[in-house]
Image (cartoon, grey):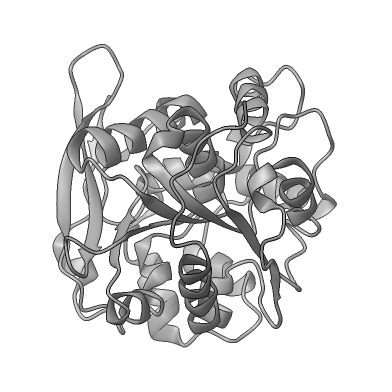
Amino acid sequence: MHALRTPDERFADLPDFPFQPNYVEVAAGDGDGTRLRVHYLDEGPRDGEVVLLLHGEPSWSFLYRSLIPILVAAGKRCVAPDLIGFGRSDKPTETADYTYARHVEWMREALFDHLDLSAITLVCQDWGGLIGLRLLAEHEERFARIVVANTGLPTGDTALTDAFAAWQKFSQTAPQFPVGAIVAGGCRTPLPPEVIAGYDAPFPDESYKAGARIFPTLVPTSPDDPAAPANRQAWERLSRLRIPVVTAFSDEDKITAGGYRVFQDKVPGAAGQAHTTIVGGGHFLQEDRGPQLATVVLDFIAATPDSTGGSAK
C-alpha cells in the first residue's frame, strides 16, 4: 500500500484552528506490515470526561473547531481524529485500499489500543456515525453516551434517499472533486473563502483524494454489500443497548432526512431522552450551528451523569 502525506505547510494559518497536531500509527491491514499515520486533536484536561468527535465525508477535524473551545471550557477532553484519507492523516492512493471494515479497524486501533479511551461521549455525523456506531456496537464497554447527528448505520435492506443516490453518482463521475465547495454546498450558511480553503487544505491535488472519492460507494446500499452483515449484527446489539442516546439532526439536511426515527424507535437508550432538531442546519451542522450542537452535548452529559453503559438482558 502506498500512501501520501499532506505537507504541514498546507495547514498553516487555518481560521479559528489553533490546535496542536497529535499522531499515532496503525496497521494498514495490507499484509505487508505497512503502517499509516492517524492525526488527532486532543484538547482539554486529560482527566476530563472524553468527548469523541468523529467527522465524515469529505471533511476532517477542522469541522469541529467551533465546538471544541466550548466543550473544553466546560472541562471536557475533546479528541477529534482525522479518518485515514482525510485531514492530516495519511492518504492511501488507491481506491481499493479503502474498505468499510478497514476504516472501523483503523479507528479502533487508534482510539482504543493507542489512546485507550473509555467512558466516551461519542458525537458522530455522516461517516463518523457509520464508523462510530460500529465501534459502539462492538465495544460498548468503552462508551458512556452517544449523540447521533445527521448519520445512520445502513444495512442495504432499505433504500437511501434520492439525494444520497445523486451524491454517490457525482462522487464517481465528476472530473474534479472540489472538497471545499462540496462542504460549502452541504451548509445552509455561506462559508467564507478561508474556511472553504481549510477544507481543501488536506488535498494538494486529485491524487490525495482516493479516500474522499470512494467513501460514498462504501455505504451499504444493497443487501449483499460486503459491510451489510456486520452492520446488521451491529443493529442487533444496538437494539439491546441501554447506553443513553440522543438524536440531534438538522431540519435542512436532505441526505439524512428522517434518519433520527430509527434510533429513537430501536435503541432502548434513546427512550425518554431530550431529542432535538437543529433548526437552520444543513448536512454539516457543525458549520451552521456548532455552538448549538455543543450545548446539546453538554446538556446531555449533565442529564446523564451516572451513565455506565450496558445491554439489556
Q: Is residue 32 above or below residue 54?
A: above
Q: Position of residue 57 (x, y in %)?
A: 52, 53
Q: How many circles with numbers are drawn on the protein? A: 0
Q: Is residue 84 above or below residue 100?
A: below
For residue 255, which quarter of the picture? bottom right
Residue at 35% x, 38% y is 107
**Left or right of residue 226: residue 280:** right
**Residue 21 or 1: which is nearer the viewer?**
21
**Left or right of residue 43: residue 15:** right
Q: Position of residue 206 (x, y in %)?
A: 41, 51
Whether residue 99 can be seen here: no
Q: Position of residue 261 (x, y in %)?
A: 79, 52
The image quadrant where one finds the N terminus is top left
Residue at 62% x, 32% y is 312
**Residue 18 or 208: which is nearer the viewer?**
18
For residue 257, which quarter of the picture? bottom right
Residue at 76% x, 53% y is 259
Q: Position of residue 267 (x, y in %)?
A: 69, 42
**Residue 210 or 157: which is nearer the viewer?**
157
Q: Is residue 29 above or below residue 304?
A: above
